[in-house]
Image (cartoon, helix red, strand yellow):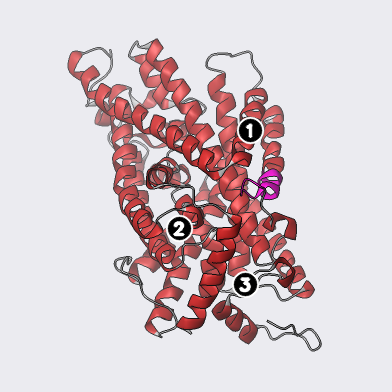
Amino acid sequence: MQQDDQLAFDAEQKQEARDFQRGLKDRHVQLIALGGAIGVGLFLGSGRAISQTGPGLVVAYVLGGIVIFFIMRALGELMLHRPVAGSFATYAEEYVSPFAGFATGWSYWFTWVVTGMAEITAVGIYTNYWFPSLPQWLPALIGLCVLYGVNLIAVKLFGELEFWFALIKILAIVALLVAGPLVMLLGWGEAARVSNLWEHGGIFPTGVLGVVLSLQIVMFAFQGVELIGVTAGEVENPEKSLPKATNAIAWRILVFYVGALLVIMALVPWTAFGPGKSPFVMVFDRIGLPAAAGIINFVVITAAASSCNSGIFSTGRMLYTLAYFGQAPKVFGKVSQNHVPAFGITASVAVMLLGVVLNYFIPEQVFVYVTSVALVGTLWTWAMIMLAHIGYRRAVASGEAAPVSFRMPGAPVTNWAVLGFLGLVAVFMGFDEETRVALYIAPIWFCLLAIGYRLCRREVVVFGRRPESAGMAVHAPAFARFLKRNPRPAGRERQL
């Protein structure tokens, strides 16, 4: 079985080599892995979370960071086993079930499309800092069009742009971590003091429930860490770059998130924050540095643009993977002369335009609504990564798959612990009236997925293989397992 697995994987990689260019260097991968998880969840969404939770929000970020560490280690092990574009769908299809692969691919696409709506919403909100009379939808539309053009050019340009976007975000947080203690030491801020962390109602002013309810925005803030899995098929040296990026991301995120939030809530009492405003911009405004506040506002615009840029990139690649397995229209499996999945990118951006429409009609509520909906898809993706990892370890134990040196610690106990945590986050979303809307949309989405899955099966046997007309290779082990579960109807046999 291992030999068949390797032959199928080699064929898959040859096809990807023809379609894509491995234009992402080690520095691109490192910054994409880190920068992908630093977006509007921290720069904008944390304002709402701070106002609801207070300093106890730090505990929620620590818990979320620990969970993300295990998710990334599981994903890292799977990527080293098989570094292909659109990795989650491939892993879920092979090691969980055909429907899991189908649902994961489409759910991840849906997640990033909705996240793109959140990011362009943030661009509109941040632009209002300088131009309060400008309608929120207009900068959102302009930003989306610019990023669309960038993604159509080449993966190397995407990597370069994302590198500098991520670097700007990281430098902004480092500047805050350095400037915050200096401000308190020199007494520049009128209310800036470490005691702000416990003077206004204690460390947990809203109780444990406040921490629980903040998990929605906390986990949304971490969304994007798994983006490294989508880049796996376009990395120059996956054996070196992927483990390095995976190991570094968890502790770096904890330092940046936890460190930044502690400094922010020490500089300004948590009671001063609220939804719809960036805590980073507010802090520099409150301590009397309006010029710095303007610079930070520019930074958070680039942060939103960066995350939307990542979303456009990942959705195009995911549609490519879905078309690869016959689970999406064939046109999405084509690449342009620049070796980018132009049709998939165009379709994704077209749906993201709905975010511009929402910014026109409901500018105040759109951010919370779309981030909540996006989180449901993210929780599903993370859960499938953990389940696929369990399946992969079982395949290794039975000799059906080759082991790799980069392994997730504590499996399978840690897998089930992470799955339990993700389930609790989904339940807690129902406690908040604004985030509850996502739980209404989720059943509708998965019903549509079930219908789409049945339609695909009725048309052709699609899982574990690529359409012969596209010259695509058979994924032997997955296809064998699929046929065992789903025998083909009489008269529908095909030569492999």
From the top left corner, tell me how far across and down residue 311 is, in percent. Answer: 56, 44
Comes first in the chain, label 1 or label 3: 1
Q: Nearer the viewer, residue 140 or 232?
A: 232
| Residue assigned mark 3 | 473
From the top left corner, tell me how far across and down residue 369 is, in percent. Answer: 60, 40
Magenta-colored stretch includes residue 393: no
Kind of element beneath mark 3: loop
Residue 136 to residue 244: above or below? above
Q: Residues within 10 Å of mark 2 (few under 14, many from 20)?
A: many
What amino acid is labelled 1 in the image?
Answer: Leu
From the top left corner, tell me how far across and down residue 334 is, in percent. Answer: 69, 55
What amino acid is labelled 3 in the image?
Answer: Ala
Spatial distance from mark 2 to mark 3, Cα to Cα?
A: 35 Å
Residue 332 to residue 361: above or below? below
Q: Nearer the viewer, residue 148 or 456?
A: 148
Q: Quadrant of residue 131?
A: top right
Start-end of magenta stretch: 337-348
Q: Residue furthest left?
A: 185
Kind of element beneath mark 2: helix
From the top left corner, tell me how far across and down residue 348 is, in percent. Answer: 67, 45
Verify CB contact (< 8 Å) between mark 2 and mark 3: no
Q: Which mark is residue 360?
A: none
Which residue: 73% across, 64% down? 452
Comes first in the chain, label 1 or label 2: 1
| Residue assigned mark 1 | 144
| Residue assigned mark 2 | 422
Q: Nearer the viewer, residue 88 or 255?
A: 88
Q: Residue furthest right?
A: 491
Pair 1/3: label in front: 3
Point out the image quarter for the C terminus: bottom right
